[in-house]
Image (tube, rainbow, N blue to C red):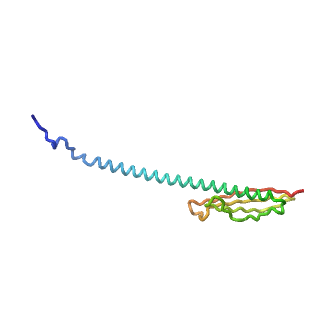
Amino acid sequence: MKTISRYSNQTARPPQQGGFVLVLVVFLIVVLAGAVVAISQLTVDTSAAQSQALQTTRAQLFNQSGLELRAQYLVSAASPDEAECALNDTTHADFPDLVLNVTCSEDTYNGVTLWTLTATSQSAGRTPEDTEYVWHRMTAVVETQEAP
């Protein structure tokens, strides 16, 4: 009976294939690491864009509420003489990162007063060079008439 040694040369790999698996594994690790970096950068960019869009929407709604508040003040005045543009203050509402400034001017033609309201909101504590800076302006015209 012939016995085969456990450590015979018949089961050994040929020497030319010894490092192929190692090169393949290193290549796959590099490719997967690059994919992870690309996906994480894409996630950061998408998050920043969504944050900017949300802040722009808040600024637009902030302007609209400032215009509506000022228009209500002008329309509900007892007389046109009492309606004035005295509310030119900077207001911080429920949006802590935005500053609102509402200005108005008046023009009177034959007993009809046209109030031009301009609401401007911008990011508080930021400059236009910042990537998270938001600036939004809205204008409305309110017409009031003297009582006959």
The front one of 96 and 124 is: 96
> Residue 98: horizontal and vertical position, in percent?
63, 61
Return the x and y of residue 57 as percentages of the image width and height. 63, 53
- The residue at the far top in this view is 1
Q: Residue at x 72, y 57 (%)?
A: 67
**Which quadrant would the C terminus be assigned to in this image?**
bottom right
Instruction: Identify the image quadrant of the N terminus.
Output: top left
Image side of residue 17 versus residue 110, left or right = left
Residue 65 or residue 35, whichever sits in front:
65
Q: Quadrant of residue 118?
A: bottom right
Q: Quadrant of residue 10?
A: top left
What residue do we see at 66% from left, 60% from top?
Answer: 93
Q: Position of residue 28 (x, y in %)?
A: 36, 48
Picture coordinates of residue 133, whole percent (x, y): 59, 60
Residue positioned 79% across, 63% down in the render = 84
As drawn, which residue projects farthest toward the right?
Answer: 148
Residue 134: quarter of image = bottom right
Q: Is residue 114 left or right of residue 62?
A: right
Residue situated in front as seen by the camera: 40 or 97? 97
The number of numbered badges drawn on the structure is 0
In the rendered structure, the answer to whether residue 50 lies left or right of residue 72 reads: left
The residue most toward the left is 1
